[in-house]
Every structure is written in structure tokens, then in C-alpha cells.
Image: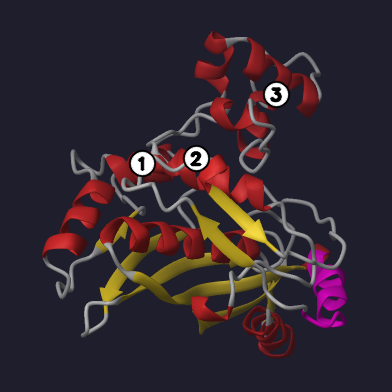
Amino acid sequence: MKQYLDLCRFVLENGEKRGDRTGTGTISRFGYQMRVDLNDGFPLLTTKKVFYRGIFEELFWFLKGETNIRPLALKNVKIWNDWPYAKYKKSEEYKGETMEEFIAKICEDEQFAEKWGDLGPVYGKQWRNFGGVDQITELIENLKNDPFSRRHLVVAYNPGEVDQMALPPCHAFFQFYVSADRKRLSCQLYQRSADLFLGVPFNIASYALLLAMVAQVCGYEPYEFIHTFGDAHIYLDHVDQIKEQLSREPRPLPKLWLNPEIKSIFDFTIDDVKVLDYDPWPAIKGKVSV
């Protein structure tokens, strides 16, 4: 996807080297925005193969208000595994288990998962219960009944609970916007911290899917996804991977199919979503900095 590659190139050429919380180091640039028209196709990167089933399952997990990795682990979705495992390794209960052994315990033992698989009040909690407010339910109702409101917001960054979270929300809040003819729906995300190699491709696809799902249940056509960044960075151990992507010619974007029978945002499952004609370059591996 050209917009993503332009962002990566911009940060490589104009960013500054900085230390960071993880100790890995980054090339970083503050402030950037890109726009993606969903009429051009579903914005799933083609310059490397992206595990989109994991992205979709994570989004459904958020929408259910979940904060424990067990439902994801049972579906072999590994997006959030590193943070609970890192915490477990620092505990007195750690007996040298590998990541694979730790996740096996999460899947097999509900009590173990309850203690060690919870991430704290992360996205799902904030989306569905921010100080008692179900932000997703309110968003859907307001988009249907008051389309021109400027308050179609969902906020994940809760300062009062951020110190209880395994990872403070990187995609901090998002806003929807209905066109003047009441036909098209757009979404803008503000991402305070953006790992360009590993995280951002997932974020683009996740919020494009969310936009399409919300549009369907509210009776609109999905239009633009606008992605606004705070600290956009490339970890120093991902520079070669980014350069490899920049050397690859983007291929045509795939198409997204949603089950037209679904009328509630909470009813979507993996069987109701299909990606058609996805023809990416091979996957590129990179280490998560925790």
C-alpha cells in the first residue's frame, strides 16, 4: 500500500535516532497523517503477508470487552502473548517455562489464565466500560440517530487506569464522521505511538474493518480511514525489514466481504468476514519490543 510505504520512507529519511522504553532504540518522527479510501480496496499490506485472521479476532475480542488473552490463545492468536509472559517470567511462580508452555497453561487452566493472562483494563474494557459508559453501544446509536454530531468518539486512553494496563493504549482514540448526504462514513484514528513495521499494518487493517462493520450496521457506505500519528517510529532492529518492504512493488489491494445479514456490531464473527484476492509478497519476521 503506497500510503504506508510513503510513511515508512518519510520516517527513515527524516526521523531522528532516539532511545526508548524498551531499550531497543528507534528512528522516530513526530506527527504524520495518511488517508486511505476504502473504495480502492481493503488496506491490507501486500509488500509482506499479514496474518489478518489474528487482526480480525483481536477486533472481535475488543468489541466483546475482553481483556484476558485466553480467548485469543485458544484460537492461536499470539498478538498479546508477550506482555503476560514477560510479567510471569519475573514472578516467583516462573519455573523456566517457554512461551509455548506458558500459553499451553493459559489454554488448559482457567485459574492460571485468570491470574496470568489478564492484561488489565486495556482496549476492550475502555471501549465497553469507560467509567460505566459503553462507548461502542453509544457510538452506534448516535451514528444512527444524530449523524452530524461531532461527538462520535471512542476513547481508549483512560488516565485513571493507565497504570493498571499491561501496555497503555497506542491507538488512543477514534472518531467517526458522516458525509453531508448521509451516505458515507469515515473514521479517523489518533495513534500516540506507532511501531511502523509490526503494529501499524495491523492497526490499518483493524480500523478499516471496524469502519466497514460500523458502516454496515448503521446503514452507511465505508469511505475514508484517516490515520493520524504521534510518535511514528521504526525500531532499530526492524530497519532492514522496512527497507525490504520498500524494495517490493505493491500489488493490487484485496477486497473485503462482510456477511450482509449481520445487523449488530457485536454479532460479527470470523465466519462473517472474508478477504478476497489477497496476493501479498512473502512474510517478513521481526521481534516485538516489550
Please tell me how many numbered marks the rendered image carries.
Answer: 3
Magenta stretch encompasses residue 271:
no
What residue is pinned by disc 2?
Answer: 269
What residue is pinned by disc 3?
Answer: 103
Q: CA distance from mark 3 to mark 1?
A: 27 Å
Circle nearer the N terminus (3, 1): 3
User: Residue 243 location, x and y as percent?
Assistant: 84, 78
The residue nearer to you, when weighing 36 against 238, is: 36
Quarter assignment of residue 237 = bottom right
The residue nearer to you, when weighing 28 against 21, is: 28
Relative side of 283 to 205, left or right: right
Relative side of 207 to 156, left or right: right
Say which element carries label 3: helix
Q: Residue furthest left?
A: 146
Relative side of 49 to 196, left or right: right
Q: Residue at x 28, y 75 (%)?
A: 177
**Residue type marked 3:** Ile
| Colouring chosen for the image of the structure | secondary structure
Q: Residue at x 67, y 30 (%)?
A: 85
User: Residue 228 location, x and y as percent?
Assistant: 46, 77
Q: Which residues are magenta?
A: 238-250
User: Residue 263 location, x and y as percent?
Assistant: 32, 48
Would residue 287 be seen by someone viewing this image from the given angle?
yes
